[in-house]
Amino acid sequence: MCGITGCINTDGRPADAALLESMVGLIRHRGPEEAGIYTNKEAGLGHARLSIIDIACGQQPMSTQDGRLWITFNGEIFNYLELREDLVAKGHRFETRSDTEVLLHMYEEEGSACVKKLNGQWAFGIWDTKEHKLFLSRDRLGVRPIVYTQTANSFLFASEVKALFADPSVARRVNFKALDQLFTFWFPLPPQTFFEGVFELPPGHSLTFQNGKTDIECHWQMDYTPDPIGLRSEQDYAEELWSILVDAVRLRLRSDVPVATYLSGGLDSSVTTAIVKHFTDRRLRSFSVTFDDPEYDESSFQNEVVRYLGTEHQEVRCSYADIGRVFPDVIWHTEKPILRTAPAPLFLLSELVRNAGFKVVVTGEGSDEMLGGYDIFKEAKIRAFWAAMPASRFRPHLLRRLYPYLSNVQNQSDAYLRAFFRVHPGDLDSPFFSHLPRFELTAKLKTFFSDDTRDAIKGSDPVSEFAKRLPVDYPKWDRFLQAQFLEAMYLLPGYILSSQGDRVAMGHSVEVRLPFLDFRMVQFASKLPPSLKMKVLNEKYLLKKAAGNYIPASVRNRHKQPYRAPEGKSFFSGNFDYVADLLSPEGLGKGGVFNSAAVSMLVQKFLAGRAIGVKDNMALTGILSTQLAIDQFIHNFNAKTSKEPHATTRSAVKTVCDR
Amino acid sequence: MQPLEAQLKQFVIDNFLFGNQNGFKNDHSFLERGIIDSTGMLELICHLEKTYQIKVQDSELVPDNLDSVNRLAAFVLRKQAAETMGASASAS
């Protein structure tokens, strides 16, 4: 895992090595072990390396033997050994054992189509010195990031936005359209980012830049073609699921450094940890987050799994103040506002992992999206079932099955439970039926927007904008699959894999590997009948069946509890200067995005201990993270970056200059 | 002392609308306008019980009693009257 950067000049200037060094310097957390720069008379690539495979010879940027193609690569190609064999058979010669070199030869052999054969998590740029062409590609589900921008005389790309801002000619401005989307969906719709003029390459896409022109193409799109019910037995599906998962884990243990696992106490990470334990002879280390606040703590389940599997386990215990303390650093890494604090404990966890001497962890992320685990799927199912017979007295009783861990929901009277979850006329016809309650709740946070922000987003309609991007076949899919698509193709890359995944892990130079997002698992899940994902209301039914006694029965049978972290209390329990400053009328006025009077009322509500609901907590987290993003990336970027520990370590950068 | 409706309206504006009145009226449904969610219900009940010294029974947690400023005011008055009568009945 690494950090990548690049710059292509369009005005005849040679590549600026100093700029590339600054770009790499700002993302050295992604790869603190080595750094390299390649420059020629028009283009340059940069690389910060976290050495995992072929530690001695895998330095980057790397070129083909003839020096025509140069690559900077972040990620892993898990099937590189198999691909390498094919290439050797076709006459390719290799100088290293690295997957980077395999990728380079794959591109040499097959051009842009080569990405279709990759099983991995990747973001890379290849500069073709003969064609004067840049090729960028991002993995199917967006595990690894790439952002890019264009100035009057150059095209720049990088793993993270902060590297683009190393070029002072790149404007640093809020993208209000993206802000509006973020305060509706939890993420901006790609290619938008929180910053105006900065774009992300959407998951499953490649980009070419040649002669000043950018061309983006989709190399993969999720498609659901479920088998007819009864085509195969449940047992048959369960066995195939297990064999794919075992192999996906096996491939992810390919590494020249030891691999550890994350353990949440839930089904998915217990399964991945169990497979690592049972199917490898490695000494297994596992890591978890625990909380002082029992509402969020899952340590009893974690301990049960640790005992059952016999892992060597370490945990980081999170207090409210811990979350408040690291929150500014977390936003420095997420590079966009977040509405939940859940990334913060994972940032602390990656620190623990790194300090324990590990830089690769296997996690259970992606299972809920692929195999049907989320409560939002269950909620949609119950609401649709009730809407089919609105007069039924029995059907709304199922609402009690939702959110057993949320006392605010469970304490409602029947009348109000029905009122909160009722289906409005027209909802069933919406392509976003499953997600409308989430969108509506989140959009309420816009009540805190300032008049200027309201003016800036006047006329924008995020939901219609989203609807335009849905695939042609989307309306034909089962409603359950539609909900899965929205989670897998949007929330997963836009929040889970980025803010809660890559960014907070790489913040401490830790790479996450996700067996549930192995391409073969994604293909398998796309053919699985929805009734085997959530059987009636039993989520991830087939995974539980497949896992059997590899995990404790109590973990297999427990109700899913989504990973959450404390919010409001985290910010008001430590006298943090940044909280006071950024939420003060002056701080809010400077940020310009929020209405100071409204935010003051929210803060008073928190200080009085009356802000207990999801909406108020999301609002506070969203406001504070937006303020931090503006403060760190727009107002005080230069002051902030001058303090970054790796920004100035240029002496360690190896430079190849090709004139 | 403000009239009861004005007090309740102010509570809703401060607590749920954060000052953004946006044409909010006393007969507007909290549910229809998405003003109160499941947590908001608990906040509202706590406020009523604390401020007006009433006890809200589970069976009374229905939109007919609680879903607008006007309904809230009527409910509070009914409850206060009933509880005062109950108190005087037990005192006599």
Image (tube, rainbow, N blue to C red):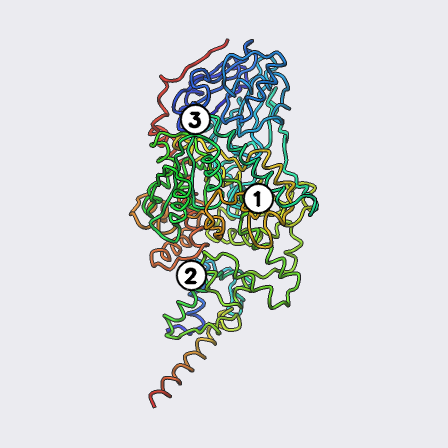
| Label 2 packing within 10 angstroms: few (<14), some (14-19), many (20+) | many
Task: Please name the residue shown 37% across and 71% down the image.
Answer: B51
Left or right: where does residue A532 sit relative to residue A37? right
Q: Nearer the viewer, residue A240 or A125?
A: A240
**Residue A502 image position (x, y, % from top left):** 46, 34
Q: Nearer the viewer, residue A288 or A10?
A: A288
> Mark 2 touching mark 1, by CB under 8 A?
no
**Residue B8 image position (x, y, % from top left):** 43, 69
Q: Secondary structure at mark 3?
A: loop
Res B43 quadrant in image = bottom left
In the depicted structure, whether residue A120 falls above or below residue B61? above
- Residue A371 got which mark? 1
Q: Secondary structure at mark 2?
A: helix
Task: Please name the residue shown 58% across and 64% down the image.
Answer: A396
- Residue A166 got which mark? 3
Camera-side mark, 2 or 1: 1
Q: Amino acid at mark 3?
A: Ala
Q: Secondary structure at mark 1?
A: helix
Chain of residue at mark 1: A
Please indicate, yes or no, whether residue A277 appears anywhere in the rendered image: yes
| Label 1 packing within 10 angstroms: few (<14), some (14-19), many (20+) | many
**Residue A248 image position (x, y, % from top left):** 54, 33
Alpha carbon distance from label 3 to label 1:
41 Å
Alpha carbon distance from label 3 to label 2:
43 Å
Q: Please tell me if label 2 and label 1 are on a single chain.
A: no
Q: Amino acid at mark 2?
A: Asn
Res A316 quadrant in image = top left
> Mark 3 touching mark 1, by CB under 8 A?
no
Which residue in the structure is indicated by mark 2? Answer: B15
